[in-house]
Image: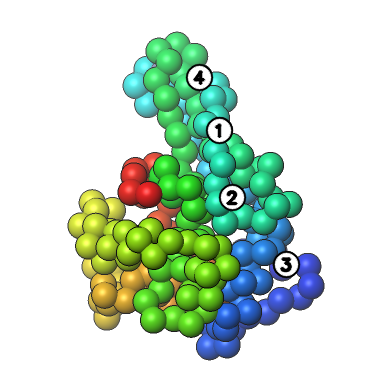
Amino acid sequence: MIKPIPGGSLWLPSQETTQVCHAIVQEPAFFRFLTQIDEELAAATRLQGCRSCGGGLHVANYPRKPRGCPVAAREEYSRRLSFTCGRCDLRTTSVSVRFAGRRVYLAVVLMLVSAPGSASARALRDRLRIAAVTLKRWRRWWCEIFPLTRFWQSVGERFMPPVTIGCLPQSLLERFEASTMTDRLVQALRFIAPLSTRVVVR
Ligand SMILES: [Zn+2]
């Protein structure tokens, strides 16, 4: 599914190391790939038209200044793809594998850095200079708020054995079968994308 990243990185989950996480968040090709997915998701949303009146949707992107993306990807990450209806002006924002609601950090950072007790997560957190208080909020979101979302309530039971809530998001990430860490991340980001238009905690 994912295009191979130039440089031939093949990361097996069992070999996940600090370097792997660091490499992923510094890899413009990975970020570009996520942009492509978002563009596809946005195109599909646009095709459906306005959910209220069925009118045509016009591009009305939100400006964003996300943290946690490589300099080379900053320009393309300065927009959250969104639309407004040409007839009734209602806004429609497509789901995203890049942005987690209004959080300033990208969804991939939220996924990689929130892993409890992981050395690689800790190192990445230090590198991105994420405040301890921010991380605490994210952990709380994963373990206390995420499980209560309508989204998780409707899909969580599909995982057998159940996903260990106290070890989120790692316990979720581990459930996606892929030969590389990037594939696994993309699958997980696609999976939680329905939450991307709702997550409000920073
Ligand atoms: Zn409309």
**Residue under pointer 2:** 37
Of pointers 2 and 4, the one earlier in the residue sequence: 2
Q: Which amino acid does label 4 sit on?
A: Gly
Quadrant in which the N terminus appears: bottom right
Of pointers 1 and 4, the one earlier in the residue sequence: 4
In this view, which residue lies farthest toward the bottom? 14
**Residue under pointer 1:** 63
- The reply to whether discs 2 and 4 touch (Cβ–Cβ < 8 Å) is no
Ligand 1 within 8 Å, label 2 CB = no
Q: Which amino acid does label 1 sit on?
A: Pro
Q: Which amino acid does label 3 sit on?
A: Ile
The residue drawn where x is 61% and y is 39% is 78
- What's the distance in space between the residues labelled 2 and 4, CA to CA? 22 Å
Whether residue 15 sits left or right of residue 52 in the image: it is: right
**Residue under pointer 4:** 56
**Residue under pointer 3:** 5
The quarter holding residue 152 reads bottom left
The residue drawn where x is 32% and y is 76% is 167
Whether residue 77 sits left or right of residue 101 in the image: it is: right
